[in-house]
């Protein structure tokens, strides 16, 4: 009797985000920053990428880009309500200002959008990061 390995089950949905590359001037610095804020771990390097596993089957794969300026992107993370305060505490401990709005005009405050709480902050390369406890209500 021979053993034939089984392929992993494919998703039953039409599409699910598996990973995305995040450009960084220093991939280790940026990956460790986000992991520290979210209370996660940085994974082992995978080729030119340094992953942060978000725990839902999606990774942010940090890619070092040094030949041109990093274009700011927006990344939003739906986080458990019971972990939100810890994330805010870690931002404060790191000396990172957080804001209640995406334009960064209401410093040191959180919002209450959609019955939850949320905040925005910049990572080391100026990416506009968002943590929120409730998803956006879409029409």
Image (spheres, helix red, strand yellow):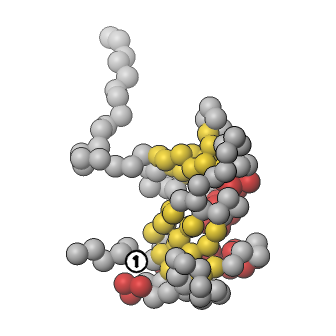
Q: Residue at x 49, y 47 (%)?
A: 20
As drawn, which residue projects farthest toward the top?
A: 1
The local secondary structure at tag 1 comes to loop
Question: Which residue is at the far front?
Answer: 68
Coordinates of residue 72 in the picture (x, y in percent):
58, 59
Q: Residue at x 31, y 37 (%)?
A: 9
Q: Quadrant of residue 32?
A: bottom right
Residue at 24%, 47% in the rendered image: 14
Residue 7 placement: quadrant: top left
Query: How far across and down, in percent of the image, does residue 73 sit?
Result: 53, 59
Residue at the (62%, 32%) spot, across then down: 47
Q: Evaluate whether residue 29 shows in this view.
A: yes
Front-most of 26 and 89?
26
Label 1: which residue? 134
Q: Position of residue 29 (x, y in %)?
A: 74, 54
Q: Number of labelled discs? A: 1
* 96 or 101, nearer to the observer: 101
50 in relation to 40, above or below: above
Give the quadrant of the N terminus: top left
Q: Can the viewer see residue 43?
A: no
Position in image of residue 53 (x %, y %): 55, 51
Report which quarter residue 45 is drawn in: top right
Pointer 1 local density, CA inside 10 Å: few below 14, some 14–19, many at least 20:
some
Q: Where 18 sits versus 94, above or below?
A: above
């Amino acid at each position: 009797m021979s053993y034939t390995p089984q392929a992993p089950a494919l998703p039953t949905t039409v599409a699910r985000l598996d990973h995305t590359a995040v450009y960084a001037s220093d991939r280790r610095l940026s990956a460790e920053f986000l992991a520290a804020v979210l209370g996660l771990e940085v994974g082992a390097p995978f080729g030119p990428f340094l992953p942060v596993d978000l725990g839902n089957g999606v990774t942010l794969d940090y890619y070092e880009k040094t030949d041109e300026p990093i274009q700011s992107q927006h990344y939003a993370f739906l986080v458990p309500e019971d972990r939100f305060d810890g994330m805010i505490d870690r931002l404060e401990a790191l000396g990172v200002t957080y804001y209640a709005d995406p334009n960064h005009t209401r410093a040191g405050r959180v919002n209450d959008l959609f019955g939850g709480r949320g905040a925005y902050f910049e990572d080391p390369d100026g990416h506009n990061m968002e943590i929120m406890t409730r998803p956006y209500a879409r029409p």
